Image: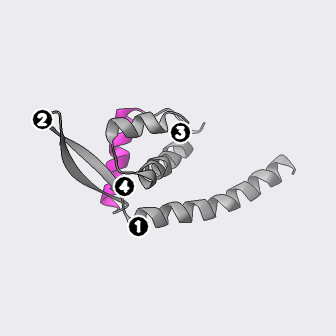
Amino acid sequence: MDVQLKKGLLEFCVLAVLKKSDSYGYQIIKDISTCIEISESTLYPILKRLETGSYLETYSIEHNSRLRKYYKITDKGKDYIDEFLEEWKQVMKIYKFIKGE
């Protein structure tokens, strides 16, 4: 898969995970890895970019005497996913055209 395409889709995969429930980095990687490979070095810049864009917010909870950073999708993040899914309908239309369907 094209690197730039994968990079863009990963943002929406992260938001999709967080749409189901709040989560933390390692768990997000585990959840996304069921459909696409992702590493910590890829995930954390995506999380930071999404946070900067107000698509998600963070909070911390103590776990095993350490603070664990959790990520929560915002309403803006949910709207971002909805916009992506609407645009994806157009991509699928083009895909079917190219495929000859």
Task: Specify the label residue 12 is tagged with.
Answer: none
Residue at the spot of label 1 = 76
Question: x, y (%) of residue 76?
Answer: 41, 67
Q: Quadrant of the N terminus?
A: top right
Disc on the earlier residue, 4 or 2: 4
Q: Quadrant of residue 39?
A: top left
Residue at the spot of label 4 = 50
What's under tag 2, amino acid-wise?
Answer: Ser
Q: Could you give the CA–CA distance between mark 3 and mark 1, rounded to whole angstroms?
A: 26 Å
**Along the line of sight, which residue is nearer the eye, 43 or 19?**
19
Q: Nearer the viewer, mark 2 or mark 3?
A: 2
Q: Could you give the CA–CA distance between mark 4 and mark 1, rounded to whole angstroms?
A: 10 Å
Query: Could you tell me which secondary element the residue under label 1 belongs to?
Result: helix
Disc on the earlier residue, 2 or 3: 3
What's under tag 4, amino acid-wise?
Answer: Leu
| Colour convention of the picture | one colour
What's under tag 3, amino acid-wise?
Answer: Val
Query: Could you tell me which secondary element the residue under label 3 belongs to?
Result: helix
Question: x, y (%) of residue 10?
Answer: 48, 45
**Along the line of sight, which residue is nearer the eye, 86 or 63?**
63
Q: Residues within 10 Å of mark 3 (few under 14, many from 20)?
A: few
Question: What residue span does the magenta drawing correspond to?
Answer: 39-53
Question: x, y (%) of residue 83?
Answer: 55, 65
Query: Could you tell me which secondary element the residue under label 2 belongs to?
Result: loop
Query: Could you tell me which secondary element the residue under label 4 belongs to?
Result: helix
Residue at the spot of label 3 = 3
Image height of 35 relative to 61, above or below: above
Main secondary-structure element of the magenta-colored stretch? helix
Q: Nearer the viewer, mark 4 or mark 1?
A: 1
Q: Residues within 10 Å of mark 1 (few under 14, many from 20)?
A: few
What's under tag 1, amino acid-wise?
Answer: Lys
Residue at the spot of label 2 = 65
